[in-house]
Amino acid sequence: MPHNITLITTIAAALGFGLVFGMVAVRLKLPALVGYLAAGIAIGPATPGFVADVELAAQLAEIGVMLLMFGVGLHFSLKDLLEVKGIALPGAMIQIIVATGLGMGLSQLWGWPIGAGLVFGLALSVASTVVLLRALEGRGLLESVNGRIAVGWLVVEDLVTVLVLVLLPPLAEWLKGEGAGHGAPLWQTLAITFGQVAAFIGFMLVVGRRLFPWMLWQVARTGSRELFTLCVIAAAVGIAYGSSELFGVSFALGAFFAGMVMRESELSHRAAEESLPLRDAFSVLFFVSVGMLFDPAVLVQMPMQVLAVVAIVIFGKSLAAFLLVIILRYPVNTALTVSASLAQIGEFSFILAALGVSLGLLSTEGQSLILAGAIISIAANPLIFKAIDPLQAWLRARSPLAGKFERGTDPLSELPFTVDQSKLTGQIVLVGYGRVGRRIAAALAQCGVDYVVVEQNRDIVEHLRKEGVPAVAGNAAEPAVLIQAHIARARMLVIATPETFQVRKMIEIARALNPSIENVVRTHSEEEARLLNKESAGKVFIGEHELALNMTRHVLTTLGRESQVDS
């Protein structure tokens, strides 16, 4: 019996080509996302050979958008954002304005309408969270101060993009110059839109945050893994669809809030883990479908326009971010890390471009330029990250402004004169005030032991000083920072930061300034621990080892055999 298998053909081709091209990209030391986009180009209508169904791919991409946004909401942490709000919030907002302005200016030179220029500029201003997270994970920077700032910056960009996705449809007619005399006035349209969004958010915060975590818990009690996974995916897609049908908001906003309310559940980590394979699969379908919309001919027909787009993405907004971070008196390394993180565009740019085309604001030519800029910038991103260290060395050697902005008259880079000098002899110098550092500091304070905190996050340093705790802002791998912490008169250096890359440099500086100092180091790597022990770095604690030791001690103490614990 003959039947239509277009859906099966499209999914099979997208996943199969995605796998092949993704593997090729990884072998070439490129992000797999580049391979997925290339796979879409290969099965798209712009290239010869097999052509997948573009309309079906677009619907599959919508599911991919829902699951992508669900994942963003599931991992969204207001607490993490608040920790870096002093740099992430103003930095991201100003950088978005600058990048959007550059994109709009470029579009005006090309003679585009104002609406097209706005969508184009916004699409160039937002970086890819997927690319950023994988780049930071691959370099072990995700838990570092620089990593948290970069992620917080991207979270602000994501939130702004979600707001844009909500506001763009009601503003479309006005941006096209058709607002007057066409239906309701703009203020009324915006009022209705905000009312619908407010009603949806109110419903999710009042009902959703109680109902859906409770439902997740009830399903988990059945002990069925497949039902649990089904519940998570059904909630993500169902809430996204329901929000669109009942409240008139976008799929993206609905899925984002679905993830946020699921995060309220104690099972949120399991929900993220169980839904990850399906989210990854549909993410691949999303990127492949985006690639299908790209016409490679744009690289030949409009090479200068493509170069201009790439210049804005890689240099324009990255330079703006670099200067903003330096002006906010963060280290050069932080500025370069944030700049490298933002030197690409990805999934949100694709979503904005597709919405702009569907609303008649952006031409397919503009969408192709955005896709070209995304593919090139994502492919170049690993090289940009590799350039951080040599560029940092060059800046510090050639540019006196870098050091001047970083430290100079910065009040947080020096201990206040009001600090009791008697507490700066025989004190503990505590590097890092994260989850581990906070607990160490609390224990020292409880025992009446004097300590000075060295922390790169300026917001944390400001908070500590308000609490009366001596703290210095800066990188402990720099001599000037440890000198300000009075390391020469300290009794002990406790390194509680997860950034093990610079630990040996910190110890080397501390010993040069204070040969008798004792060092206590935290690490999660057994290889790093062996290397530190070999260099007589002091007492090295491996996180997993200490956890296992304490759990074993508790078990044997409960059994009355604590004397047999091997310490």
Image (cartoon, rainbow, N blue to C red):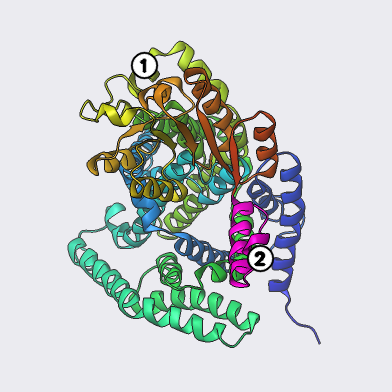
Residue 2 image offset from top left, x and y in percent: 79, 83
Q: Is residue 464 visible?
A: yes
Residue at which label 1 appears: 401
Judge depth for marks 2 and 1 and give the one in front. Answer: 1
Residue at which label 2 appears: 53
Residue 389 sits above or below residue 191 on the image: above
Residue 22 sits above or below residue 425 on the image: below
Q: Nearer the viewer, residue 550 or 179?
A: 550
Q: Quadrant of the N terminus?
A: bottom right
Residue 565 colored magenta? yes
Q: Amino acid at mark 2?
A: Asp
Q: Secondary structure at mark 2?
A: loop
Q: Earlier in the sequence, mark 2 or mark 1?
A: 2
Measured Cα–Cα span from mark 2 to mark 1: 55 Å
Number of numbered callouts drawn: 2
- Please provide the residue range marked out in magenta: 543-567
Question: Residue drawn 59% across and 88% down?
Answer: 222
Residue 522 image offset from top left, x and y in percent: 55, 42
Q: Quadrant of residue 273?
A: bottom right
Q: Is residue 375 visible?
A: no
Position of 14 with respect to 424 (left or right) is: right
Q: Amino acid at mark 1?
A: Leu
Q: Secondary structure at mark 1?
A: helix
Residue 387 image offset from top left, x and y in percent: 58, 26
Q: Main secondary structure of the magenta part?
A: helix
